[in-house]
Image: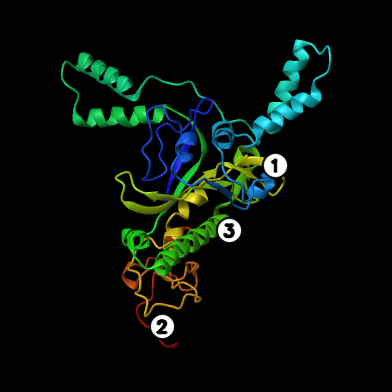
Amino acid sequence: MTIHKLTAGDGYTYLTRQVAGGDVPREPGQDAAGYYTATGNPPGMWIGRGAPLLGLAGQQVSEEQMRALFGHGQHPNADAMIQAQLAAAARPGMSAAGLARAGREAIRAATLGRPFPSYEPLEKFDVRVRRRLAIIAEETGRDPTEAEIKKVHRQEARRQRAAVAGFDAVFAPVKSAALLWALDERGWVRAAGRQAHEDAKNAALELLEDHAAFTRAGTGGIAQIRARGLIAAAFDHYDSRDGDPNLHTPVAISSKVRGADGRWRALDARGLYRLTLSPNAIFPGSGAAPRPARSPSPAAAPARLWPRPVRPARLSCQAGQVPTRPAHLARPAWRSGRCAPPSSGPRRTSPRPPAG
């Protein structure tokens, strides 16, 4: 599993620089909503424990819904909700100010929590870098050094701010499994490969739901509280940009979550990033698939092409080491920040002398 931020911009033109994974190339000027719902890919589906909160469980994803949720931070069906509320609030002879107020209230009702913050756009990155390097050359009378060039690049890369609309998690098996799924002549093998991919993806998403669905509350986000699940849109893609078989599922996870207190807030993504390696232990991202012993009968269940997903072991403070690591890679558990460090006092290397 890989994960990347999905940044929001003005209107629905967000994510123009982001991609979901190796498949259909983004056309010039095509936004992420159009990319995810590109013709030729199967329709996406709303998934996650938070989808039923919006009445989306099991429904297909539309481009308008993607724009509303990831572009504006609104309910995916915001357009219909706003129109319905305006129709209910409109009265004959209503003033322009009244209509405007009703429109603002309708938009507020369709927005999930606070709107995405907007930032003033800057000039293009290359233009800003060239201008600063020219200033250095003019002031020093020499060409900028390599260290100065790198420093300018780092500083300019951090200047442009953008709201985070969500996170793009891509689930893909190893290439050999994808080729086996696509090219094997035995139908039961292809079905087993596809089912194993779905099982592993679902298990990894369950792990994220259990251990990464949190938000923050209080002044400065001082308190971390559990969210009522993630809202995500999953899209099955079958090939790479070069046309090679590449079974993978991009999952766009919304940054909007509903806290246990019922309020819509932003997803606390720290747990999401910290758990990036754990889903990889569940999802078949590495290792060879065991060869089936024999072809099952048509009525039998398809053979699994890789091991059944297993949740990673918990950190054991008593053992003093991370149990999921090999012995030569084990490190003290207290260095992970989850256990108290050992006593720093001197160690006794010889037995205590007998009492006189």
Q: Which residue is mark 2?
A: 352
Please tell me which residue is depicted at 45% across the width and 87% down the height of the picture. 355
Q: Amino acid at mark 1?
A: Arg
Q: Amino acid at mark 3?
A: Asp
Is 349 located above or below residue 161 in the figure?
below
Q: Nearer the viewer, residue 169 or 133?
A: 169
- Quadrant of the snapshot with the N terminus: bottom left
- Indicate which label's residue lies in the foreground, 1 or 2: 1
Q: Nearer the viewer, residue 253 or 78?
A: 78
Where, by quadrant of the figure, is residue 278 drawn?
Answer: bottom left
Q: Residues within 10 Å of mark 3 (few under 14, many from 20)?
A: few
Q: Which residue is mark 1?
A: 263
Q: Residues within 10 Å of mark 2 (few under 14, many from 20)?
A: few
- Mark 1 vs mark 3, CA separation in Å: 19 Å
Residue 338 seen by the camera: no
Where, by quadrant of the figure, is residue 290 drawn?
Answer: bottom left
- Quadrant of the snapshot with the C terminus: bottom left
Please tell me which residue is depicted at 44% across the width and 70% down the height of the picture. 320
Q: Amino acid at mark 2?
A: Arg
Secondary element under disc 2, as helix, strand or loop, is loop
Please tell me which residue is depicted at 38% across the width and 35% down the height of the picture. 26
Among numbered discs 1 and 2, the one appearing first in the sequence: 1
Q: Which mark is residue 210?
A: 3
- Mark 1 vs mark 2, CA separation in Å: 61 Å
Horizontal arrangement in the rendering, residue 192 relative to residue 202 (left or right)? left
- Give percent across and percent down for residue 221: 61, 41
Horizontal arrangement in the rendering, residue 132 relative to residue 173 (left or right)? left
